[in-house]
Image (spheres, coloured by chain):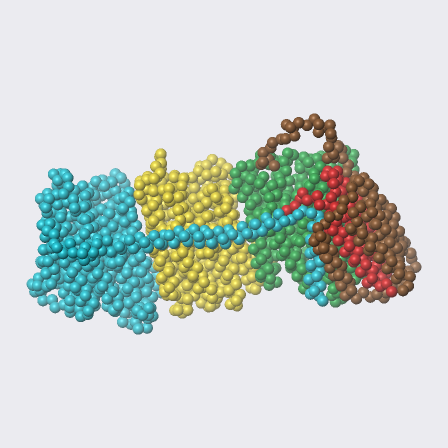
Chain colours: A red, B yellow, C green, D cyan, E brown
Amino acid sequence: MITMTHYLVFSALLFCISIAGIFINRKNILLLLMSIELMLLSVNTNFIVFSHFSNDISGQVFVFFILAVAAAESAIGLAIIVSLYRIRNSIEINLINKLKG
Amino acid sequence: MIENILSLLIWIPIISGLFLLFFNKKIYILNTYNIFINFIVFILSIFLLLSFNESNAAFQFVEKIEWIPSINIFYHLGVDAISVLLILLNTIIFLIVSFYNSTLIVKKTNQYYASFLIANGLTIGVFSALDAILFYIFFEALLIPMFLIIGIWGGANRIYASIKFFLYTFLGSILLLVAFLYINSSISSFSVISFYESDFSLIEQEWLFIAMAIAFAIKIPMFPFHTWLPDAHVEAPTSGSVVLAAILLKVGAYGFIRFVIPVVPMGAQSLDVFFITLSLIAIVYVGLVAIAQNDMKKLIAYSSISHMGFVTLGFFVIFQLFDNTQSGSDMIISLSGSMYQIISHGFVSAALFMCVGSIYDRYKTKKISDLSGLLNQMPVYSWFFVFFALANCGLPGTSSFVGELLVIMSSFKANYIYAFFASTTLIISAVYSLWLVKRVVYGEVKITLEECIDANLIEKILLFVLAILVLILGFYPDYIMNFMNATLENMTNNIILKI
Amino acid sequence: MIIENTLNSLMNFIPEIILFIMSMIVLLAGTFRFSTKYVFHITLLSVVTALLLSFQNYAVNASLLFNSSIIKSNVTDFFKYVCYFIFLVQILISRNYLVDKKLASGEFYSLLLFALLGCFVIISSNNLIVLFLGIELSSLSLYSLIALNRSSIISSEAAIKYFVLSTIASGIILFGFSYLYGITGSLSIEDIAKHQNLNESSNLYLFSYILVFIGVAFKFAVAPFHMWLPDVYEGSPLPVTNFIASIPKIAFFVLAYRFLEDNPIINNDNFSKLLLLLGMFSILAGNLFALAQKKIMRMLAYSGVANAGFIFLGIFLAVNNNFSIAAFYVVSYSITIVSAISIITFMSSKKFDLVYINDLKGLSNRSGYIAILLMITLLSTAGIPLTIGFYAKYLILDAMIDRGLIIATVIVVLMTVIGLYYYLRVIWFMFFERGSNSLINTIGKFNLFVLSLIPTSIILIFLFPDYIFKYVFEILT
Amino acid sequence: MESLILFIPFLLLLSSIVIGLSPISLNNFYSGIIGTLLVFVSLVLSIIILLDIYSAEEIIYYDDFYKWISVGDLNIGMGYLIDKFSAIMLVVVLSISSIVHLYSIGYMKEETDFKRFFSYIALFTFSMILLVISNNLVQLFIGWEGVGLVSYLLIGFFYKKQSAIKANLKAFLVNRIGDMFFILGIVMVYAAFDSFDYKTIFLNLNKIDLENLEIYFGLSYIDFSCLFLFIGAMAKSAQIPLHVWLPDSMEGPTPISALIHAATMVTAGIFMVGRLSPLYVLTEFTADFILLVGASTALFIGAIAIFENDIKKVIAYSTISQLGYMVAALGINAYTVSFFHLYTHAFFKALLFLCAGSIIMSLHHNQDIRKMGGLKSKLPITYVSFMIGTLCIIGFPLTSGFFSKDLLLEVMLYENSSISFVAYLMLLLAALVTTIYSLRLLFLVFYNKYRDKDFENIREQSKIITLPLIILSVLSIISGYLIKVFIDLPIFMFGVSDIHYNGIITFIEHGILSPATLALVLGFYIAKKIYKDKISFNFIENNLFNKISLIIKSKYKFDEFFILVSDFMKSISFKMSKNFDLGLIDGWVVNGFPKKINSLAVLFKRKSSGYLYHYAFSIVFSLVIIFGIILARVI
Amino acid sequence: MDIITILFYLVTSVIIFSSISLVIVNNTVHAALLLVLIFFNSAILWLMLKAEFLSIVLVLVYVGAVLVLFLFVIMLLDIPVKKNSSPKLYLLFSVTTSLIMFAELYMIILFHNFSDEANIVVSSELNNTYEIGLMLFTEYVFSFEITAFILLVAIIAAIAINMSKKQRSLRQDPGKQILENKKSRLKIIKGDEL
């Protein structure tokens, strides 16, 4: 029987993988964005699980908003990446350290 | 007006100083303005002295206004004899400094004068605040004008000195704030009067004592915390040095007698041997260090530290005195001695720094090794210099002797070893003062100035006034002793009750 | 009924609505190539209108709007006033800078307004969804604002760093939200707090709160979640930095307040210790890092880290629902830092960016007035008496001692001394060093007047603080 | 009558201030006259007081001018205590002072700082009077330091001369060593009696349970306090080993040497011990100590004078030696005797110095006796005066020195203890030494041939110089005949009841027949043979004698010892300043900690990479740690 | 083992494995496609949780719009595939950290006593889409409006950030390069002007 805990552990694992994706990745900034999407996915899953098991629709409404915002976020993220690429001709993360100290 | 005299004393100079910041006119107007304000303050302080009832030990001219009732802070002013004397010292020194400043040429004159005026008001605030936080605010705020005075108008290495001065004293004073807050958290009042009525356990008192004593020990400064002072003195402009030595160090001493000893006497008692030792080290060791200095200002700075050792010695032997004799009388004597030393040192060091400053103005050097035979070129100055150097080594007949005698006396009654080390100052202070005189004042001329200017009229008058004050204080100390008597008696009774 | 309710809510939310509408007008004005002058004036007009309307709309009692998703009370109004004030100063000062840097445009101002609105939404939110949207609205606007400075390498770098890290923080916060929702079955913050009141403490609840507060710590830039702050400060255009440094801090403080108000979790040993340790660590790290900085904005950023630590301490000390200490700290710090960054903005000119602290050498010779303003501001940040910053630190220390945290207090106090050093360094550069950078802009009478508003109020509030204290204590206790 | 006492210090102070601050327009000569007149008036007043005191038995003037300090139980006044003892001292001081004032008008007339000089000596006289009339220890100390101060200023009067400014610093510092102990002594007395006042102290002497006072290092409390007080006196009265300043102090103008360094100030120590005699009689150890110090000073320092070639320094060493006599007498509690010698010595030593001054003036500031000789004819008045002085100092019968010295030796002999007998022998030997060096001086200066150029231009000084010499000569001769007064001096608790004084004639007879006369004759013989007749004795070539003379010529290395000590202290203070104060406290702690913190900050700054993934990692890592800790706590 | 269980494990394992490979893959296009896979599987998972509307939205919005945008940007920038070269130690450290984090979350979830299935009321009368719509336009209408603004911000930002009025690219113009000489390339400025 698949219980709530199963779902929650799954999304926790997804969350951890996505976060690991952010800091393991050293080359491509686009992967970072994808990891972020993954992270939001895990959060969404959480919400849906809770919504389902407590039979309360508002969790799903939240997911709806998160989806919308995540879309907007990735749009802005990609815009920034494009502008970064234009000015530096590269989007390698390990070259972005002009600001430090 | 008489009820608000303290507020007037504080705010007249501060407000006129702030006004001066935005008021850059011809120099003689500035001079007149500056002297005028300082003179008004001086007159007011004389007025305060005269209308003060010295037989009444309670705080007088009390002003208590709700300032920040929501956090229990009051605008609470009031004076007892100690404060009155220090306020008077303060106004006299600032008046003298304002006259002295008028003989100088400095850049940004209006700001320079403004800093001094503000410092004047703030110091009076320190001496008359009866609310601990108000005291702390004045105490801290006082750093800012001094910081600027040293930093803007100071010598070559002024930045280092001013930063050191500021940070070091800030370090101490913020511990003081912690102590005040702690006291407040248990008696829920910042009033000095309720501080006196507080009753802490021994261990609390010890910690409170350490926190407050470090703050004031840095300010005074006591032995291991003293190294900021020589630097600050060396780099400060002459008037700054005068104020620093004559007033700011006294703020530390005042803190001891106002906050540390009466508030946490048990803490002080249990740590008094340690502080007595530090005082003795200050007297002997710092005195010896003073001998080795080649910079006149540094030498006088170290001698100030050494003299302040007497003040703290007098403060801290009272507990052992009480143990030995079970009477308050010796404690009063000891405290009077310290207070007298405070006042006396104010005048003597002020005069010495003025002398050195004027020498520096003319010869552009403060190095002892560069100078010799000043007596040939500026006799008037030199004789004043000799006089104050002698006063500095505690020659009887000058004011310094009184305090030293009383403190040595009291410390002997506490423990003969203290007295032995304390009395070495007779030798050590003579060595550094007179060796200085020998090298600088006497002998053949080393640097011949094209046109040698001896003291001008104002300088002569100022030094003369200071000399007369030193002599009067030396030959007739009884007025001041009597003046303080009731207050100190009350204070010692309080202390005795609490230990 | 729903419609009536909504209409009523709209009426009560009119200042924000006005801002929403005006921000779009600003955008349109920009799009139709109005001169930047008009854009600026429209922005100014909209903010002033909104401010006036919100004065008129001042709520003494709390009321719930939009089906309880928005709360309007004297607390929210107070913080909004502060934000309006800060925002007004910021846009007034930044006008010339933006024109010089060719950033002044309709989209810039409208994004700025959106960011402000996002913060207002955070301040008023009573619901996790609205809260999340508010956070995202302000953050997204700010990412874009930073990235708008297309020509600058460091701006885009700052933007991407801010973007990625902030999104992680949002993710962490959301993760916490999801658990909170799961435990309580409600998205209302009030209900969430009540749940804790009713049920015995559950570990998951604690951990989800920790997740949320780690997110908050990130937004406040509390060490060790502070790395983005110096980079963003340095990289973004000064007006944006000015915004990031102040208004979101206030908004997130209100968020923290909402989450902890009437919530016994603040008495939870683990949670409160976490706040305390984060605060202490932040003070330590911030001051230490700030010492070595040569660039003025980075220095201010690290000082901001230290101050964020103080804010966390303030939140930690908010037992018995007494948030007034932290609130006072937040407000005083925000207006102070706005003053500092505004002064720096003012001094930068077309040819010259004030980047290094060295550039300030001898400023007092060139313009003593500005030097004094900056000095007052910095002394306030350091917490020296005669400035409002003193009371801010004072209240924190006082409360810490009341809690019996003597050693922590002493450590904090010692760190303050270290912190004082780098403020003093600026002061000594301005006053004690010789020579002055002739490129520094010191002219502009109106701007000087605006600049002196905050330092003056810093000192005036120091002298007569009681009204403010009473007010803050009343609404936040 | 009693109110007159107020005028004496007042007039002197007035004189000092008026002359010191007078405008340049005031003529030097007139200012000198003013000063002299004021002192002279004081002298007259003091004589009136003296007569008044002697007019009746047991008159003591005692009162305070004003309260100096009254705080708690402490009362210190500025006042006076005039009894026979201090009245005599008053007269002695004022008479010498007025004579020196007069003399100085002539002696200093060419100095530019004439007025400063007069101001100083008036100030000196004031301080000395303050000391003499004091009724408490604090006032005594004020006067004590005051005279020291003026001595300091006057030794350094020629401030351009390196030797002068070295000497004055030395004088002051050595005195300060004494003062340190002196003040400790004062404080000890105060601690025991709770008062500085003589009257209270003496009255309570019997009430205080002396046994109950603490004992330090095996010595009783009173022993210790008296010892400390005496160390103060040792510095002031130039006793071994603190005598080193006095020979150097001859850098000052000669009248000063007469007034301060011979007649008055240096005897302050003797006066003080006399004043506190009620205390001193209670001590045993300290008395013996005093005796030995005095006797050895008298002998050993006297011996140095034999080999000294500077005319003033010879007299200075002789002063030290004579002071040794007085101190030795104090050591056997014979205070009156000591005081008697003080009194006679004041006159003849002042006389000798003034004569020396006259000679020096005449020889244009040549002080080296090897370059003098045969001045008998050129300076007749000086010669006679000098002769009288010399006779007095060697104790030639019927001169004042004869009375005081013989009395002293007699008393010493009658004291029944081995130490005092040793002291007696030493003093006897010292008498021989005194004779030798005094006569050597006389012979070398006035007899034989002049050993320098320009003999023709030497001539006697003006009347203003010679008049004081004549007055002092007369006083030197006659002062000894007042022996009765001193023997009867009542203020000392243990007077000289042991002395069997049977009138002056008997005393003279007895004195002439004493061993001292033998020493005198022997000394005269040796001195005449060696210094006048230039006959060398065999024993001088003796190896042992050579060694002894070498030791004496080295002045026992006291100066070197003090230089060593001061160099040591100096190097210590330099080292402490550099290594400890600047190095350890300032450099290592005060500046060191901030520097360490700063370098830590710089290190952190350098180590931070600025990479996005590091930032993200640190966030997650912190989160993991926080979770881990709290999990561990929760579970 | 019922079908739901099998499906759950199947779907979740696909998601986990694809997400792990997404994290470590070098080729961005592959990553994007993996993301598509993940989203599809998530949609299945959400369907299992009876969130039909959202699973449809996920596929439509994410796969249909966002990931296309991603792919578009990938193609636009045309970034060469580079090997991810984290130092071993760092890699170890970060993987460990994530594992610990998972372990912690696992423990936290496990320790919490979720009332499994107790609350599940099997399928209400209303359908999922209707319910969400009702909520959106009544209770969450304000949020809905804000979302609109967020999207507006995204639009403005995306345009404004990349809208360039003139050529700002750092790409070098060969013609200009040839015309440069030593003087115009090297400009000496004083140190303190920096």
Looking at the image, which is closer to me, D500 or A8?
A8
Evaluate whether residue B377 shows in this view. Answer: yes
Of residues C235 and D613, the one drawn nearer to the viewer in this rendering: D613
Foreground residue, D572 or E85?
A: E85
In what quadrant of the picture does the C terminus of chain D appear?
bottom right
Q: Using residue D290 as the reference point, say whether residue D453 is left or right of it.
A: left
Dividing the image into 4 quarters, which one contains the N terminus of chain D?
Answer: bottom left
- The picture places residue C326, in percent across and down from the top left corner, at 65, 55
In the displayed structure image, the side of residue B474 where residue B209 appears, left or right: right
For image coordinates 64% across by 47% down, the residue present is A101
Q: Is residue C344 left or right of residue D623?
A: left
Task: State the image coordinates of residue C198 (x, y, percent, origin top left).
Answer: 76, 66
For image coordinates 36% across by 62% down, the residue present is B419
Snapshot quadrant of residue E178 = top right
Rendering coords of residue D55 (x, y %):
15, 62
Residue C304 in view in this figure: no
Residue B316 as seen in the image, left or right of residue D62: right
Q: Is residue D63 above or below residue B383?
A: below
Name the residue rendered at 77%, 38% in the picture. E162
Q: Residue at x 77, y 62 (%)?
A: E106
